[in-house]
Image (tube, rainbow, N blue to C red):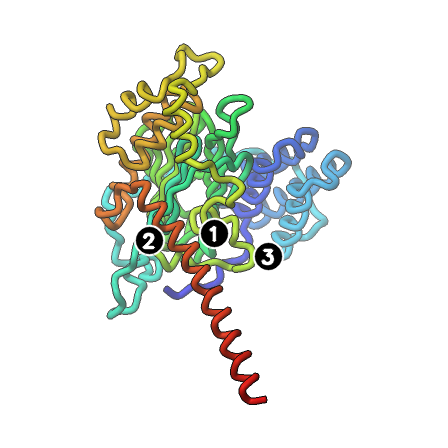
Amino acid sequence: MVMGKGAGPSALQVCQFVVLFLCLFPTATLQCKILKCNSEFWASTSSSGPEEEFCTALRAYNNCVRRTARTCRGDLAYHSAQHGIEDLMSQHNCSKEGPTTQPHARTPPPPVQPPPDINVPSDRPEVCHYERSLPRNAAPPNYTHCGFFGDPHLRTFNDDFQTCKVEGAWPLIHNKYLSVQVTNTPVVPGSSATATSKLTIIFKNFQECVDQKMYHAETDELPAAFADGSKNGGDRHGANTLRIVEKVPGQHVEIQARYIGTTIVVRQVGRYLTFAVRMPEEVVNSVEDQDNQDLYLCLHGCPANQRIDFRTFRAHAAESQGLGRERSGTPTHGFTYQSAMSKCKERLPVEDLYFQSCVFDLLSSGDINFTLAAYYAFEDVKMLHSNKDKYHLFERDTIFNSASERWGFSFLILISLVVAQLWTDLCFICL
């Protein structure tokens, strides 16, 4: 796939960058009013107009940002807005001197709905359709899957299945084309179990296909649009190769990024979010900085010190028959090991790792909604995974993968020792 550099920053990208910092660092911007400046500028430039009007709005935006200097000094969003204004001034040949009438918001035109036919029109650039952009005789792409759900449980692109703590903000995916970050909060006070309450996805601008777009969801707010209100990739020729489809309002959203062969499913189940993705292996491995990819959870899994021993927890639960604790404010009285298994069996008849994760979640939280989270996570696997023989994962699969890694490393050490000994013996003979 031929990868090119995107266009320079646009007004939309500047706004998105500011909004992203506000989402990721809310406490740092409580007193800083940069959001007000940003929203006024965005409202005044949301539809096309004469260049003079844009420059007037940009100067007004600059004045607004300067007035926030005292409260916003040191704020990353404030400084990014400053640099963005300078870039836009240069790109549009706007003078810093001139009218600065406070911009008035225009009524934006109704959003253009993508056509119901998902086939790519003939006038769309081939580079904006992943499979069509591949060389003619190339092998079919290998599609991989990653899922993140529940308390939380992670299925990596390599089909490893882990249960993790990972409280706070963590990157699931970070490559040349998109970044995905989740924020996890404790499910029960005092417990190591967490669940996802926020999700941010950034699609980076790509050739003539799409502008940079950001999608942000959090508990009780699962929007059917990107942060700028649009539902596709912007104004470029291949914009419709990135689009959002709302499956169930407030509960299920699908994001199709056909220019990179990727489909993302975001759900809200109960109070928490789930994430699932189908992505070509080439895109999965298109990392920009190998040295900073260790925390790319979908690729490398959770750090060892963040993993929860699934088998030990289950063994203790089975012995005590009563580790389920009642969550504050919920009518449930908790679950025993047997009652949790019975409840999970209703939705997940096969006792695979999705079933085991359901049991774990009920015992650790008492929240019955986690039964549905595990069920929908497995439904997403059936829709997104390319190998039906790997839909179900069992404990023996995880043990085998872990053992393979350990034995592979041990084998390398053994070979190194043997070679070192042979070299020592050879040197001794020569002497």
Between 302 and 288, the one lying in front of the other is 302
Sequence-first disc among 1 and 3: 3
Q: Nearer the viewer, mark 2 or mark 1?
A: 2
The kind of residue on which mark 1 rests is Lys
The kind of residue on which mark 3 rests is Gln
Mark 1 secondary-structure assignment: loop
Q: Nearer the viewer, mark 1 or mark 3?
A: 1
Tell me the quadrant of the picture where the N terminus can be found.
Answer: bottom left
Q: Which residue is mark 3?
A: 91
The kind of residue on which mark 2 rests is Gly
Q: Position of residue 148 (x, y in %)?
A: 40, 38
In the displayed structure, would residue 64 be above or below residue 409?
A: above
- Callout 2 touching callout 3 (CB < 8 Å): no
Q: Quadrant of residue 365?
A: top left
Between 314 and 233, the one lying in front of the other is 314
Tell me the quadrant of the picture where the C terminus can be found.
Answer: bottom right
Mark 3 secondary-structure assignment: helix
Mark 2 secondary-structure assignment: loop
- Crowding at label 2, few (<14), some or many (≥20) Cα neighbours within 10 Å? many
Please state the total of marks drawn on the protein image: 3
Q: Quadrant of residue 93?
A: bottom right
The structure residue drawn at horizontal position 48% and vertical position 25%, both measured from the top left corner, is 187
Q: Position of residue 289 (x, y in %)?
A: 53, 59
Residue 110 in view of the camera: no
The structure residue drawn at horizontal position 45% and vertical position 69%, both measured from the top left corner, is 415
Q: CA distance from mark 1 to mark 3?
A: 20 Å
- Callout 2 touching callout 1 (CB < 8 Å): no
Q: CA distance from mark 2 to mark 3?
A: 32 Å
Q: Which residue is mark 2?
A: 261
Between 278 and 58, the one lying in front of the other is 278
Q: Which residue is mark 1?
A: 204
